[in-house]
């Protein structure tokens, strides 16, 4: 699985304005729904919040990777948001979040396998400080894609 085949510029939002985790997740899930990755936005968000209750998805370095397997995912997708300002989020390093990668995967066996592959793929990229810095500076969807390809 190549990262460039997973990232869809239609579900990337740069210069994003949100004051909270809830606002940010609402906006990103709306992008997924509008672009037909989800069958039910509210039910998908409920699944994401159930996963959020299990443990932190803020991985540090101003990045969060919220996710949840959901029966309401029609097509696997990764919505990416780059915020104008840091928002509060439960993170490993105690800082807030400026970059959000929201994974939408089905709750079947195939979805579970792809979920692990996606998390691994993005975690490797996000472990690189240069990739993270480029992502957080991105002003256009194409710059987000380039950050992950770098």
Image (tube, grey):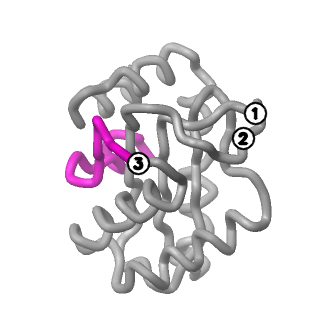
Tell me where residue 129 appears, x and y as whole percent.
57, 16
Tell me where residue 144 appears, x and y as whole percent.
32, 32
Tell me where residue 141 appears, x and y as whole percent.
24, 37
104 to 109, vertically: above or below: above
Please name the residue that numbered disc 1 is placed on: 94
Q: Quadrant of residue 63?
A: top right
Q: Residue at x 62, y 70 (%)?
A: 49
Q: Is residue 89 left or right of residue 138?
A: right
Q: Residue at x 78, y 58 (%)?
A: 55
Q: Secondary structure at mark 1?
A: loop
Measure the C-alpha gap from mark 2 to mark 3.
17 Å
Split into 4 quadrants, where in the image is the C terminus?
A: top left
Tag 1–tag 2 contact (CB < 8 Å): yes
Q: Secondary structure at mark 2?
A: loop
Q: Quadrant of residue 149?
A: top left
Please name the residue that numbered disc 3 is placed on: 18
Q: Is residue 105 left or right of residue 147?
A: right
Q: Is residue 69 left or right of residue 77?
A: right
Q: The magenta stretch spans which residues?
A: 1-18
Tag 2–tag 3 contact (CB < 8 Å): no
Tell me where residue 108 appears, x and y as whole percent.
57, 82
Q: Nearer the viewer, residue 81 or 108?
A: 81
Measure the C-alpha gap from mark 1 to mark 3.
19 Å
**From the viewer's perspective, is the residue at label 2 or at label 3 nearer?**
3
Please name the residue that numbered disc 2 is placed on: 91
Q: Nearer the viewer, residue 76 or 140?
A: 140
106 to 137, vertically: above or below: below
Q: Is residue 41 magenta?
A: no
Q: In terms of sequence position, does the residue under pointer 2 or pointer 3 come before the other?
A: 3
Q: Residue at x 41, y 48 (%)?
A: 18
């Amino acid at each position: 699985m190549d990262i460039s085949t997973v990232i869809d510029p239609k579900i990337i939002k740069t210069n994003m304005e949100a004051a909270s985790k809830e606002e940010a997740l609402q906006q990103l899930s709306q992008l997924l729904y509008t672009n037909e990755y989800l069958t039910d936005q509210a039910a998908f968000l409920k699944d994401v919040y159930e996963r959020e209750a299990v443990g932190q998805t803020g991985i540090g370095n101003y990045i969060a990777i919220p996710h949840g397997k959901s029966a309401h995912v029609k097509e696997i997708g990764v919505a990416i948001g780059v915020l104008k300002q840091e928002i509060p989020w439960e993170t490993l390093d105690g800082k807030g979040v400026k970059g959000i990668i929201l994974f939408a995967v089905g709750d079947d066996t195939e979805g579970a396998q792809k979920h692990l592959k996606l998390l691994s793929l993005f975690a490797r990229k996000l472990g690189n400080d240069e990739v993270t810095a480029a992502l957080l500076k991105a002003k256009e969807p194409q710059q987000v894609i380039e950050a992950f390809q770098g």
